[in-house]
Image (cartoon, rainbow, N blue to C red):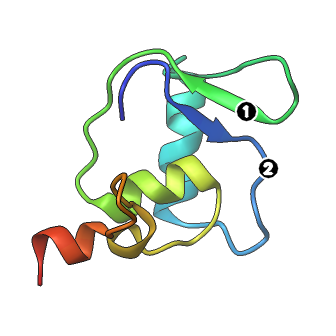
Amino acid sequence: MLTGSLARIRETDAFFGWSKVARQKFIEEGSLVEVGDGISYRFTQDIVFNSPTAAAATVTGRPINGWTAWKDASGNTLDDNLRK
């Protein structure tokens, strides 16, 4: 995730486990800070995730499949571009 990228503050009830713990760690260390609009966090440094799903879950605050969530400008998913 690049510095300046935004993430949603609100988390769903289904958001728990490793992704919730990782997100909380980023908040505590200051890598993810509130923007002030009550809706968004902003990344204060570049963060390399181990998987596209981990990145997507951190950004959305919910369980999500990163291979299908991330899309390019043409609407093709990461899965379309890298695994098919």
Q: Is residue 41 left or right of residue 72?
A: right
Q: Is residue 80 above or below residue 53?
A: below
Say which residue appears at 25% left-offset and 37% top-offset. 48
Q: Under tag 1, what secondary structure?
A: strand
Q: Inspect the image, locate mark 1, and give the three-letter code of the amino acid beneath it.
A: Ser
Say which residue appears at 66% left-offset and 67% top-offset. 15
Q: Is residue 9 left or right of residue 28?
A: right
Task: Name the foreground residue: 29 vs 64.
Answer: 64
- Residue 1 x %, y %: 36, 35
Characterize the local packing of mark 2: few (<14), some (14-19) or many (20 or more) Cα atoms within 10 angstroms: few
Residue 9: image quadrant is top right
First of labels 2, 1 by sequence position? 2
Quadrant showing the C terminus = bottom left
Q: Is residue 30 above or below residue 7?
A: above
Q: Which residue is mark 1?
A: 40
Task: Name the foreground residue: 15 vs 1.
Answer: 1
Q: Is residue 46 above or below residue 39?
A: above
Measured in 3D between alpha carbons, the distance from the residue under mark 2 to the one under mark 1, in whole angstroms, is: 8 Å
Q: Which dot marks residue 80?
A: none
Q: Which dot marks residue 10?
A: 2
Q: Residue furthest bottom?
A: 84
Say which residue appears at 82% left-offset and 36% top-offset. 39
Characterize the local packing of mark 1: few (<14), some (14-19) or many (20 or more) Cα atoms within 10 angstroms: some
- Residue 49 x %, y %: 28, 46
Task: Name the foreground residue: 84 vs 42.
Answer: 84
- Residue 74 x %, y %: 35, 60
Q: Are marks 2 and 1 in contact (CB under 8 Å)?
A: no
Q: Inspect the image, locate mark 2, and give the three-letter code of the amino acid beneath it.
A: Arg
- Residue 43 x %, y %: 50, 24
